[in-house]
Amino acid sequence: MPKAPKTTMKTASTTTRSDAADYLNTEERQAIYIAAALETGDADFVRDALGLVARARGMSAIAKKAGLNRESLYKALGETGNPEFGTVMRIVGALGLTLSAQPATSGRTSKRRRAA
């Protein structure tokens, strides 16, 4: 049985490197993104969101405003980083943001004790 001829097909594709920080190009978008991360309650997502926004604004500038060196900021907000709450607050302040709390939405209502 004769073998079928081999055909090779070369495809050339080019990809462009994309950075999500490029899309967070306004303070409003950045604040919305961080707020969305906070709403998830996922500490890793919050850390990543802070890192992404810090990159969008410039890590060196944010590190300086937060009173950290750039390497410490990269380490704290890196993939394996686990920044202390005080560090998070310094970064949030350097980004010109504040954190606030509101009641969580759930199907349960809290039972409050009445004061006597």
Image: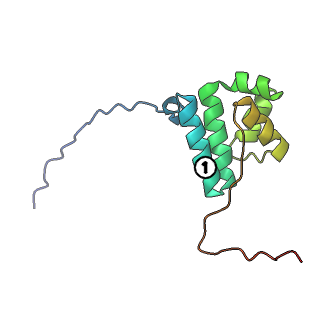
Q: Quadrant of residue 112?
A: bottom right
* Res. 13 visible in picture: yes
Query: Does residue 84 appear anywhere in the picture?
Result: no
The quadrant in which the N terminus is found is bottom left
Task: Judge from the rendering whether residue 76 lies leftward or rightward of residue 106; answer left or right.
Answer: right
Residue at the spot 77% in from the left edge and 48% down from the top edge: 82
Residue at 63 percent across and 30 percent down: it is 55
Q: Residue furthest right?
A: 116
Residue at 22% of width from left, 41% of height from top? 8
Percent x, y of residue 36: 58, 49
The residue to which callout 1 is attached is 37
Colour basis: rainbow
35 or 64, which is in the foreground?
A: 35
Q: Position of residue 53 (x, y in %)?
A: 62, 34
Q: How many discs appear?
A: 1
Outermost left residue: 1
Q: Give the answer, above or below, for where 33 lies relative to 39.
A: above
Relative to 30, say whether 110 is above or below.
Answer: below
Foreground of the two, 76 or 15: 76
Picture coordinates of residue 43 (x, y %)? 69, 53
On-image quarter of the C terminus: bottom right
Residue at the extreme front of the image, as rendered: 116
Where residue 4 appears, as percent x and y from the top left, is 13, 53
Q: Amino acid at mark 1?
A: Ala
Mark 1: give few (<14), some (14-19) or many (20+) Cα within 10 Å. Answer: some
Of residue 114 and residue 27, the one placed in the foreground of this image is 114
Between 85 and 80, the one nearer to me in the picture = 85
Q: Classify mark 1: helix, strand or loop.
A: helix
Q: Residue at x 38, y 32 (%)?
A: 15
